[in-house]
Image: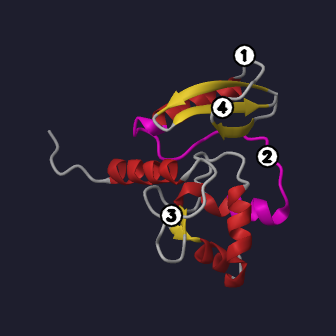
Amino acid sequence: MVGTVIHSPIGPLTLEATATGLRRVRFGTFEVVRLPSLHVEAAALQLSQYFAGRRRAFGLTLDISGTPFQLGVWALLNTIPYGETRTYGELAERLGDRRLARAVGRANSTNPVPIVWPCHRVIGQSGKLTGFRGGLNKKAFLLNHERRAAQPTLFQA
């Protein structure tokens, strides 16, 4: 596993990859073996584009493992449009059983590539921000960043 630490508006992010693909995005600074990696370089570039408001979706090669349920939840994260939110219950309903909302929350909390797979777009039934490994302040920042970037330009030159 190789990686790097990048700086972002929400603090340092540690990117880790295998020879196959990006494995993790971690909030904070962690020790990593710093060797050249196309997967880490691509992730760093795409995340910088995201934070600059020039990228709404990621096109990275990933090396992720999880249970079938986790993989199903994580796949649904990419269906949530940029700048929008869905509730845990709505995702559970899409998986076939609204009663799985808590299980969706647990799977969401283990998302190995936050931001890339936008788990920050999942909120509580009441519309409030709930649980986020990076902290609710980072979740709020990401949602506000996307909403600002998604606003249409009123005037064009």
The spot of residue 40 in percent (x, y) is 67, 27
| Alpha carbons under labels 3 and 4: distance apart | 24 Å
Q: Amino acid at mark 4?
A: Thr
- The tag on residue 28 is none
Residue 61 at least partly seen: no
The residue that disc 1 covers is 36
Camera-nearest residue between 54 and 17: 17
Q: Is residue 26 left or right of residue 46?
A: right
Secondary structure of the residue carrying numbered label 1: loop
Disc 2 to disc 4, C-alpha distance:
16 Å
Magenta residues, start to end: 50-74
Residue 64, label in figure: 2
Classify mark 4: helix, strand or loop: strand
Residue bearing the label numbered 3 = 129
Residue type, label 1: Pro
| Marks 4 and 1 in Cβ contact (< 8 Å) | no
In what quadrant of the picture does the N terminus appear? top right
On screen, residue 74 versus residue 126, left or right, reads right
Of the numbered discs 1 and 2, the one sitting upstream in the chain is 1
Name the one closer to the observer, 11 or 89. 11
Real-space Cα separation, disc 3 to disc 2, in angstroms: 26 Å
Q: Mark 3 or 2 closer to N-term?
A: 2
Mark 2 crowdedness (10 Å alpha carbons): few <14, some 14-19, many ≥20: some
Residue 14's disc number: 4
Task: Give yes or no for residue 66 being in the magenta stretch.
Answer: yes
